[in-house]
Amino acid sequence: MEELSPIRVVHYGLGATGKAIARLVAKTPGFLNVGGIDQDPNLVGHDLGEILELEQELGIQVCIDPQTVLNSARPDVVVVATTSLLTTTYPQLTTCLRARVNVISTCEELVYPHLHNPELAQEINQLALRSGVTVLGIGVNPGFIMDLLPLILTGPCTKVDRITVTRVIDAGLRRGSLHQRIGAGLTQLQFRDHIADSSKRHVGLTESIQMLASSIGWKLDRIEEKIEPVLADEWVRAAHITVAPGQVTGLRQVARGIVGGQETLTLDWQTYVGAHETYDSIEIEGQPQIKLRIPGGLHGDQAAAALVLHAIQTTVTSVPGLITVTEIPPVHYHHY
């Protein structure tokens, strides 16, 4: 029996998530890292194996020029793990598509781009069709825990009235850059100015609501979204930060999907330093009632890496065009 060639993977973006994906690909039979692209001068020119802290170098230098890597590496798929916003990721995606390479991206807005970026979504789809390749946006949130998983859980239901998904994350266990993004250590007044910058808020809740509503067949009246600070009622100490009573420890961001005048979809995302209990929970009100709770919750980087890995082969073999996670077989673990 002829042995299949490994799937050749280029990694575009080597931040925390990008490196987690590349490490997992490096350790999984049937996949081969063949290139790395990043603009960070501290990474450019270094061996990918060194950057990933593997036991040995891979003989692959990280390069700043994507076209050079795509031309020389001949990948089957590019994993784009750069930014949350589609307007920023769009040029990176089109570079890969013009090179006729399949793309998987962790860009949150790409997971369901038809809500905020319908024109860009159409352009990406048309370019992918012309190039004969597939584009998929995937991640933990959006892309799984707040949309795909609750959607799958409605399978046994004969009636669904309401879906509520809650994530509570202890930011004290995460990297320091997250503390800054969620405003930990700020006063309430400083937080108001901080959160006015759209890059500080979590991207993806409205995409998840739209994906759920569209898949189920609910017509949304509107989507409401609110962000408020979580305040410390006592001293909170973590590895990289100390928060005084009355200061902001993080934020709570809630998106609501209104259907027929009723709040039918509720996505509640809480990330703050010192959370006493962390979990992901899904509640489906209907027939039957379904409740799922994941103690400790899913770890973002680890889960994202696994989801991307498990979606690679499906993406490479899918029909050309821009697709969503609802249009492919359920992403699941493989014993490679």
Image (cartoon, grey):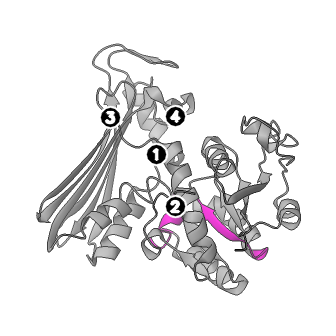
Name the residue carrying label 1: 201
Q: Calculate the distance from the C-alpha at mark 2 to the C-alpha at mark 4.
A: 21 Å
> Cβ–Cβ below 8 Å for labels 3 and 2?
no
Q: Position of residue 302 (x, y in %)?
A: 52, 44
Give the residue type at disc 2: Ile
Indicate which disc residue 278 carries. 3
Name the residue carrying label 2: 138
In the image, is 278 to the left or to the right of 196? Answer: left
Q: Is residue 164 above or below residue 228?
A: below
Mark 3: few, some, or many residues within 10 Å (few <14, many ≥20)? some
Name the residue carrying label 4: 178
For image coordinates 73% across by 57% down, the residue present is 32
Identify the element where label 1 is drawn: loop
In the image, is 285 to the left or to the right of 230? Answer: left
Q: Can residue 147 be seen? A: no
Residue 253: name its quadrant: top left
Who comes first in sequence, dot 1 or dot 4?
A: 4
Q: Calculate the distance from the C-alpha at mark 4 to the C-alpha at mark 3.
A: 16 Å
Q: Is residue 129 above or below residue 267?
A: below
Give the residue type at disc 1: Arg
Q: Calculate the distance from the C-alpha at mark 2 to the C-alpha at mark 1.
A: 19 Å
**Is residue 213 one of those drawn in magenta?**
no
